[in-house]
Image (cartoon, rainbow, N blue to C red):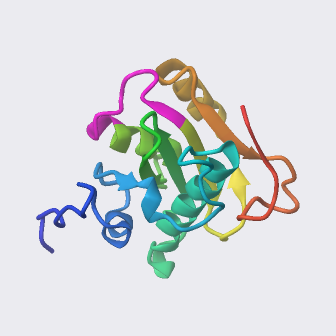
Amino acid sequence: MSSQQPPPGPSGTVPEEELINSMGNSTPLDISDISAGPATTNGVNTEENIVHKLVAAAHATIAKVDKTNQTAHQVGAAALSADGHTIFTGINVTHFNGGPCAELVTLGAAAAGGCGVPGALTHMVAVRNDGVTVLSPCGRCRQVLMDLHPGIRVIVDTNPRRGVGGQGAAACW
């Protein structure tokens, strides 16, 4: 396996498929590379657009996990940088002695990509590897998010029976 980074895409970011294959790499993904969700309004990301694109990025990230190893990686997360164009992703790591949640792995990737200071991230979402479910952060992740990024908006499902998965309603807290 090569340790070389893939060549940057036209906007200086790594193409989506290469970023997702690296899962948790600090190389950012340009939000315009994700085709899910409605278009921007006059070139500005709307809250609905951000929700759809982050959910799609998180689902795409966790979907790349080897299906024989799903017990170790069940949650994907995505966060949007304050520039409105860069998405950082991560997956959880489960081990018998514990392990970081996907949100914390994503925060680490964002910090390595230059977005570790308060205000550098505006939105975050975590999803289950079932392709539908949007998850609320656990207590530890809520505390870390509030301490490190006090203004971040966390996307949560307003109707867990339906799932956001691109169709349902979502709210940010």
Residue depicted at 65% across the width and 31% down the height: 139
Q: Name the side, left or right, on which 92 lies relative to 140.
A: left
Residue depicted at 33% across the width and 63% down the height: 19
Q: Name the side, left or right, on which 25 lies relative to 99.
A: left
Q: Is residue 116 above or below residue 132?
A: above
Residue depicted at 88% across the width and 60% down the height: 161
Q: Name the side, left or right, on which 36 lies relative to 156.
A: left
Seen as rendered, the residue at the extreme front is 42
Expressed as whole percent of the image width and height from the top left, the position of residue 80 reads 49, 43
Residue 172 shows in the view: yes
User: Which residues are drawn in magenta?
Assistant: 111-122
Expressed as whole percent of the image width and height from the top left, the position of residue 147 reads 52, 19
Residue depicted at 51% across the width and 68% down the height: 60
Tally of numbered discs: 0
Is residue 118 shown in magenta? yes
Residue 101 shows in the view: no
Is residue 142 shown in magenta? no
